[in-house]
Amino acid sequence: MIKKMTVVLFHLAYWMMYCFLIFLFMVIVTKGDLRSVNLLGSAPVAIFCFVPAFLGFYSFSGLLFGRYLHPQRIGTFLLAGVITVLSCGAVSLLLMWPYRGFATHWQQLEMLLVMAALAAIHGIIGLVLKGFISWYNDIKVKEELNRKNYETSMALIKAQINPHFLFNTINNIDVLISKDAGKASLYLNKLSGIMRFMLYETNGEMIPLSREMTYIDQYIELQRIRSSNDGYITYEVDGTPDNRMIAPMLFISYIENAFKHAEHKKAENAIQIRLHIANDRMVFMCRNLYSVDAPMKQEHNGLGNELLQKRLQLLYPGRHELDITREKGVYQVNLILHDA
């Protein structure tokens, strides 16, 4: 990303170039005889040249760029731009009021429009400079995101499958073979689907939400065969994935953590998982009971809260809300992902 000092140097270079252009213009106007111009005493000229320029440049780059410059808000942006340049011209005109060299209303209106046009020119240049800086920063952030995604994906592939879960699932399927071969085959296919998903489908930056949900379904179904209590796990989905995309294996770490540390396997709703899919956001909740007498370390399968939160910050900057609570024997994760 472009450092703040570099941005400051960009701005200084721009204004130095602008001062040079004004100087060059004055040289042309005076035909090289600058002695005829009282530079120190030309306050109205200084106000005319610099005040609307500064106001327009920083109003557009600092205010309008982030708030209104969006494809769906072009009309609002244009209206705000017109109001801004007229305001810049009006402020400049008020500053020039003590040096009235124009008395008529038409002259005042003319000066207002000229300074508004000057503010508009510098405002557009400010937008271009701000856009360049933002574009460059986005490239750097994307490169960092790709690197972090690669590192995280490798960590997920290496650490995501809990060996105990894998071995226990294989043993459970082995027991089922003699009791119900059809059911054993079904669970074996689910396990195969989980392995295939993690090994071949988690390298991309985004995957279809429907595929992620299939993986979660398969994982939960394999966990169900480890308990004779049907009410031990509650998994609810509200809404449809449609064409929604999501970062791979974003929810599963919290789900695995719940199964790893959940106590009271004979209790109803010992693990509750909910996913609400709305038009503008996804709400994920994972809740598990744990023993308050035994110390519990929520490890998220080796990835840790810090890495998971860092991944969220890289993938959904400013578009996620994560809240983790642990109290009175209940560990709960609430994660909201907002659409762009």
Image (cartoon, rainbow, N blue to C red):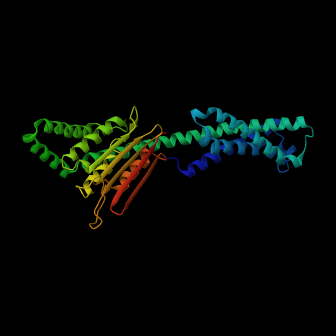
Residue 256 rendering spot, x and y as whole percentages: 28, 50
Residue 321 rendering spot, x and y as whole percentages: 45, 50
User: What residue occupies the far bottom of the structure in this picture?
Assistant: 293
Compare residues 188 and 61 and report the one nearer the observer: 188
Compare residues 248 and 33 and report the one nearer the observer: 248
Q: Is residue 338 visible?
A: yes
Residue 198 rendering spot, x and y as whole percentages: 26, 41
Q: Is residue 30 visible?
A: no
Residue at (88%, 47%) from the top-left corner? Answer: 99
User: What residue occupies the far right of the structure in this picture?
Assistant: 103
**Is 250 positioned to the left or the right of 177 in the image?**
right
Residue 35 rendering spot, x and y as whole percentages: 85, 45
**Is 281 positioned to the left or the right of 175 in the image?**
right
> Based on the displayed image, in which of its 4 quarters is residue 110 positioned?
top right
Residue at (88%, 36%) from the top-left corner? Answer: 107
> Based on the displayed image, in which of its 4 quarters is residue 265 positioned?
bottom left
Compare residues 5 and 190 and report the one nearer the observer: 190
Residue at (42%, 45%) from the top-left corner? Answer: 283
Instruction: Give the tally of numbered discs.
Output: 0
User: What residue occupies the far left of the structure in this picture?
Assistant: 178
**Is 22 positioned to the left or the right of 325 in the image?**
right
Q: Is residue 272 above or below residue 202?
A: below
